[in-house]
Amino acid sequence: MKNRPFKQVDVFTDTPYLGNPLAVVLDGSDLSTEDMQHFAQWTNLSETTFLLPPSAEAAAQGADYRVRIFTPGGELPFAGHPTLGSCHAWLQAGGQPRASQTIVQECAKGLVAIRKDGRRLAFAAPSLRRSAPDPALVTAVAQALGLAPDAIVSSQLLDNGPVWLALLVNSQEAVLALTPDHAELKRLGQKVGLAHIESASVATNLIARSNREARAFGGTPASGAAPADAPVGLTVRAFAAPIGVPEDPVTGSLNASLAQWLMTDGLTPNRYVATQGTCLGRHGQVYLARDEAGQVWVGGDVVTCIDGQVLL
C-alpha cells in the first residue's frame, strides 16, 4: 500500500452535500481489479473511480486519461456523474487537456468528450440503443415499485453502457411517493429509472428562454438554453439494487439516455433541466441540451468536499 492523491467530490450541484458524491483515486496505477473493487465496497458510495494514463490506442485518438468506474457491486463501462466528477478532480489536480476546451476521457465504453465553460462541465452522451421492454418485466417492476400500471405513460429499455428500464410516469407526485421493494428489484435484476415531464407550458418556457447557460454545451443553441433559474423540465428517480445501490441520488447515464429518448420523440424541448434526489434530501440538477448536430450534452456543477490522500 501507498499514499495516493484522493478527492471526494459532489456532482450535479454547486452546493456541497446536495448532489451525488464520488470518490476519486487520482493514481490507480498498480492496483488490481480486486483492489479497486474492495475499496469501492469500503467507500460504500454509488461509484468510486480510479484514474490511469490512457491506453496507447486511446492516446493516439486524443484521450487525456483513463477512468475505471466501480459501484459496490461491480465495474461499470460508463456512468455519468463519475465522468464529470473524475474530470473535475483531474483538472483540479493539475491535469492539462490536449485541447483548450475539450477533455477526452477513456472508459470501458470508449472515448467520451467533455466540454468546460467556467465552472460547469458537460459530457457528450454516448450512443444509445433503445427497445421496447417485455410487458411482463414492466408489470413485475411496477409491482415491485408499488406503482399503479395506469400511471405508466410509456416505457423503454435504454442502453448507453448501463441498461435502464425507463418508465415515463403521469404525475410528479407518483414518482416522489414511491417506496420500492428493493429486494424484489434486485431479484428481477433490472435497474429502473422513472421520470415525469413537466407541463407543456413549462417546456415552452424552457425553449423560449436563453442566457449564459447556453455556453455550457458549446455551439450556438437553435432554441435557447435552460437557465439556472428555469422551471424544472423533468423529475427523475433511479433505482439500482442489482448493483448494490438501492436509490442513486443523481444519475448522469440515466439522464443522458432519457434525454436522447425524449428529445428524439419530441416529448421534451431540446434544452431542459432535470432534478433528482429530492427523496434523499438532495437537490441535484442536470442540464440537458441537444446541439444542431443532434448530439446530446449532459452538464452539471461539481464541488470538491474532501481533498487529501488515501492509503491504498
Image (cartoon, rainbow, N blue to C red):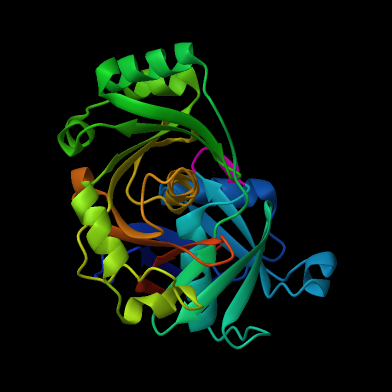
* Outermost residue, top side: 136
Q: Is residue 222 above or below residue 215?
A: above
The answer to whether 146 is drawn above or below residue 271 in the figure is: above
Vertical comparison of 81 with 9: above or below: above
Which residue is located at x 19 percent, y 60 percent?
231
For the point 49% across and 47% down, the residue is 264
Q: Residue at x 22, y 46 (%)?
A: 280
Residue 73 belongs to the span the image colors magenta: yes
User: Where residue 106 appears, x then y in whole percent?
Assistant: 68, 63
* Residue 227 picture quarter: bottom left
Membership of 97 in magenta stretch: no
User: x, y (%) of residue 184?
Assistant: 38, 17
Relative to the observer, which residue lies in front, 270 or 97? 270
Viewer can see residue 18 = no
- 34 to the left or right of 273: right
- Quarter holding the N terminus is bottom right
Q: Position of residue 247 (x, y in %)?
A: 33, 39
Left or right of 146 in this view: 173: left
Q: Which residues are magenta?
A: 72-76
Determine whether 175 is above or below 46 in the image.
Answer: above
Q: Quadrant of residue 312?
A: bottom right
The residue depicted at 45 percent of the width and 48 percent of the height is 42
Main SS class of the magenta portion in the image: strand
